[in-house]
Structure formats: structure tokens, C-alpha cells
């Protein structure tokens, strides 16, 4: 996959880009690019925003600036590419959408800032509008990291243990339910015991116990 993140703050992704699963994915041949709208803005002095028509507080990111960034990255080859605008009012991001996006050969995430992005980006340039939750962040960067993280961990080779992604919360292996609880040493801490079955070596019993706990958490 080629994952392109369009942002005014590429430096916000430094920590994220260095994470092991992201580095593993890159080693497997996937690409992560950080593209700064300011580098390709057609306006003078690095301008990317303007006052809203109709008045009101804050500035709005301009459609020509976003279009120029996409044009610079893709030229006229935009057809078929998944271009996701991050916005609080978009489709709620979940595991099913993470899986769907992880199957795209090319994915672009458009981070907004300020009061948001000119609506014509959503209407004419983006293929999707996605929200990471019904709350307002100050910018799309954290939302992009949430989506990129959930998507990248699904790419073959990204996780050290491939099974980790097969059986985790909301996976098919758990019938879409949340994951069961995990425990590690010590077996007794302040009187809080690890369930006996997990230390029994009875694989069938452990499996049954885990599926039951997962089902309980779905209720
Ligand atoms: N005025 C906008 C509103 O009321 O919906 C909020 C704009 S927000 C301060 C600036 C940018 O942060 C948005 O353009 C979007 O890219 C990003 N953002 C904020 N909250 C988000 C969320 N819950 N999901 C996805 N992106 C979000």
C-alpha cells in the first residue's frame, strides 16, 4: 500500500513513523508519505486558508490548496484512489472500515485544521469523509494517526506475530466481539488471582474460557 497523509504538520508524525509495525510495513514494501499542503500551495507566502464566506470565527482551508496538493502527488491519476477527508461529521471509523481501507493499494488521508476544510473538498475531491469519534480535535493529525495505525497493523508483515491481528477485538475469529482478558505473572498479586484454567495447560479449556469471556464482553 502507498499511504499518503496530507497535513500542515508533518513533524507531528515523527514518533508514529518510527513505530515498529510502521517500519516493518515499510520494510515489506509499503510506503508512507507525509505531504505538506504548504509545499504545493498555489498561493503566495505559503497561504493555505481564508476567511469563511458568510462570516464567523476561524479560517477555512482552501479547496484550491488541497486540490494542488493532490495534483502534485497524483497528477491526473486520481481515479480509483481512496481519498479520505478527516472530519468530525464523517462516517464513524471502525474495524470494518479499517479492514476495507487496508485492502486499498493507495490511500490518502486529508488532515484539516482551523475551522475545517472548504466543503467542496468533501463534495468533489474526497471519496470518503471519516470521523474517529463524535468529538472535535484541533486538527486531523491525531485522527490520521488513529486510522493509519489501525490500517497498517492489518498489512501482512507489519506485526511481529501475525496471529496477533487474526485474533483480536472485533476480528472474525472472535465473531466480531471484543477480545478476552489477558493475564501474566505474578499468578497472585495482592490476593488478585489469575484464573486457574489459564495455568492448567488444558488448551481446549483455555479456548472455551476465552470465547466465553469474549461473548460476555459483547453483551
Ligand atoms: N469546525 C469543525 C466542526 O465543528 O466540525 C471542526 C474543525 S477541527 C477544529 C479541525 C480539523 O480537525 C478538521 O477539519 C478535521 O480534519 C480534524 N478533526 C477534528 N475532529 C475530528 C474527528 N473527530 N475525526 C476526524 N477528524 C477530526
Image: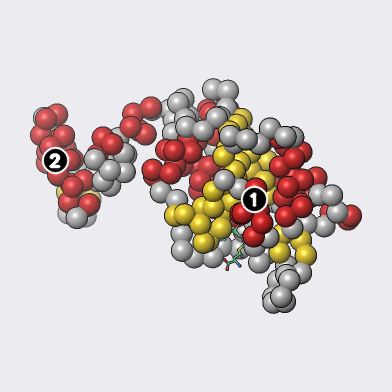
- The picture quadrant where one finds residue 5 is top right
**Residue found at x 15% / y 35%:** 206
Q: Nearer the viewer, residue 137 or 87?
A: 87
**Residue found at x 20% / y 43%:** 187
Residue 148, position in %: x, y?
A: 53, 42
The verdict on label 2 being within 8 Å of ligand 1 is: no
**Residue found at x 38% / y 43%:** 96
Q: Could you tell me which secondary element the residue under label 1 belongs to?
A: helix
Q: Nearer the viewer, residue 209 or 59?
A: 59
List the single residue furthest toward the right: 44
Q: Label 2, on which residue? A: 209
Q: Is residue 41 visible?
A: yes
C-alpha distance separating marks 1 and 2: 50 Å
Q: Label 1, on which residue? A: 124
The picture quadrant for ligand 1 comes to: bottom right
Residue 92, position in %: x, y?
A: 44, 55
Colour pattern of the rendering = secondary structure
Examine the rendered structure and indicate whether residue 120 appears above or below residue 96.
Answer: below
Residue 135, position in %: x, y?
A: 49, 65
**Residue found at x 74% / y 44%:** 69
Residue 51, position in %: x, y?
A: 76, 69
Task: Identify the image quadrant of the C terminus.
Answer: bottom left
Amino acid at each position: 500500500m502507498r499511504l499518503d497523509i496530507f497535513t500542515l504538520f508533518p513533524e507531528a508524525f515523527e514518533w508514529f513513523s518510527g513505530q515498529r509495525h510502521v517500519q516493518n510495513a515499510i520494510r515489506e514494501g509499503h510506503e508512507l508519505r507525509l505531504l505538506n499542503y504548504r509545499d504545493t500551495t498555489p498561493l503566495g507566502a505559503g497561504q493555505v486558508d481564508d476567511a469563511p464566506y458568510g462570516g464567523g470565527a476561524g479560517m477555512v482551508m482552501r479547496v484550491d490548496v488541497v486540490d494542488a496538493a493532490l495534483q502534485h502527488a497524483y497528477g491526473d491519476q486520481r481515479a480509483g484512489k481512496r481519498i479520505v477527508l478527516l472530519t468530525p461529521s464523517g462516517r464513524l471509523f471502525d474495524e470494518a472500515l479499517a479492514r476495507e481501507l487496508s485492502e486499498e493499494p493507495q490511500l490518502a488521508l486529508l488532515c484539516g485544521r482551523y475551522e475545517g476544510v472548504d466543503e467542496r473538498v468533501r463534495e468533489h475531491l474526497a471519496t470518503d469523509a471519516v470521523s474517529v469519534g463524535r468529538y472535535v480535535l484541533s486538527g486531523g493529525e491525531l485522527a490520521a494517526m488513529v486510522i493509519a495505525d489501525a490500517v497498517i497493523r492489518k498489512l501482512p508483515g507489519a506485526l511481529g506475530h501475525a496471529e496477533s491481528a487474526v485474533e483480536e477485538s472485533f476480528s472474525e475469529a472472535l465473531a466480531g466481539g471484543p477480545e478476552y482478558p489477558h493475564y501474566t505473572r505474578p499468578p497472585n498479586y495482592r490476593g488478585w488471582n489469575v484464573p486457574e484454567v489459564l495455568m492448567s495447560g488444558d488448551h481446549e479449556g483455555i479456548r472455551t474460557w476465552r470465547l466465553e469471556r469474549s461473548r460476555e464482553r459483547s453483551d
